[in-house]
Amino acid sequence: MDGFGALSMLAAIVSEIEKRLQYCDHIYLGFSGGLDSCVLLHALSKSEYLKPKITAVHVHHGLSAHATAWQQWAQALCLQWDIAFYSQSVFVEQKNSKSLEEAAREARYHVFESLMQSSKDVMLLAHHQNDQAETVLLHLLRGSGVGGLAGMPVWRPLKKGFLYRPFLNIGREKLEVYAELHQLDWIDDESNQDCRFDRNFIRHTIVPLLKERWPAVTANLARTTRHCAWARDRVSEWAVNELNTLLDNRRLKLSRFRDYTKEAQMELLREWIKQEGFRLPGFDKLKRIVEEVVPARRDANPLVKWEGCEIRRYQDYLYALSGSLTFNNTSAYVWDDKSKPLMLLDKTGQCLGILSGMFLPEDKKITVRFRQDGEIIQWKGKHRELKKLLNQWKIPPWERDFIPLIFFDDQLACIPGWAVGDDFIDWQEEGGQVVFERR
């Protein structure tokens, strides 16, 4: 492509960005200082409409000896172009089987997500067609399905805001032409040449070899992503419709779920986990859920977990949980001011939930405790063990330690939402109650 063609294409893209982002309050731009982000920032800096809304976001990973110099260079360039600049240092920690690439990416996206404060915030990233082709090849070699082969989307939600990749259908060579015409400088990260990293191996070894035989390989792979994205969206629509018949209070009911093929079960799990707001797991985790958790005995309590999410089973249901389920609180709370709600804290000082009461008896000492085993309540004419009642009520085992127990003068009087002791029925009939709101 000649210089005029590159300039015309970038001008058209800037015009498209102006249309798409006309109602945005804040435009953040992931600015590594590399060729791609330099071209995007330079092109947008020429827009009188967009420029006042833009903040360049530089993430200091600390993985290179040059990282601080790159940060300073990026800040100086933004000052020269009169663009707001924000930088944040991150600690990149490799966990479990994560590669350094993946760990750095996650750290970077945590920064991006933290900036999204409303639906009118957007994060721009300068991924281009070559990046998309590399992503598809990576996913293909890892055995991904249509979701993985759909590659990176142009748009997707990012916490409260959105992520937007306006260059995704533009080849890198066009960006190079633009940069040369405007005499732009950029950062060359030496790690991008290290073929120990999978993406670099594909970029420097596999793609050049493919281009010798198929010169249009990157454009063709980009077209494949669009076909797969269409197929993925149709599968997602099917899964959404099917989940309407499978979910019960956000739990996945297994009696019907088992009727689907394993492949269909995995698609349904993906959609359910996505609806619950959790990060999607890899293929191996989904396979374990389908092959180990779903067919487990009814009285089993199997578990599959990944960062930020746990999939548990209790009786005939699957639960998607946040993973912060360890709780053992031996504290007792005295409800002194009965006219006000009582805040319950976990061992770290975080709010566990709020208790609010109606017509609490003024002549009794009211204490709140949590299960320690051995509690008894007089209920429906019998002394009943709390442990057996929790089983009878089919409360999942991991939830039981979080249920507050209300004692009147050291006698278990109320289990909010479940039972009031026989000796306190008159209090209940007069409008007395305790409500627990879990946080």
Image: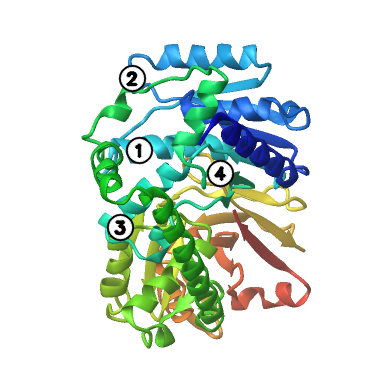
Using the numbered discs, state the Cα–Cα distance from disc 2 to disc 1 in whole angstroms: 15 Å
What amino acid type is highlighted by mark number 2? Ser
Judging depth in this view, the residue of 388 and 274 nearest the camera is 274
Mark 4 residue crowding within 10 angstroms, few (<14) / some (14–19) / many (20+): some
Element type at mark 4? loop
What amino acid type is highlighted by mark number 3? Leu
Judging depth in this view, the residue of 257 and 10 nearest the camera is 10
Are circles 3 and 2 on residues that touch, CB within 8 Å?
A: no
Residue 323 seen anywhere in this rendered image of the structure: no
Upstream in sequence: badge 4 or badge 2: 2
Q: Say which of marks 3 and 1 sits in front.
A: 3
The residue identified by callout 1 is 103
Using the numbered discs, state the Cα–Cα distance from disc 3 to disc 2 in whole angstroms: 30 Å
Residue 165: numbered disc: 4
The residue identified by callout 2 is 64
The residue identified by callout 3 is 140
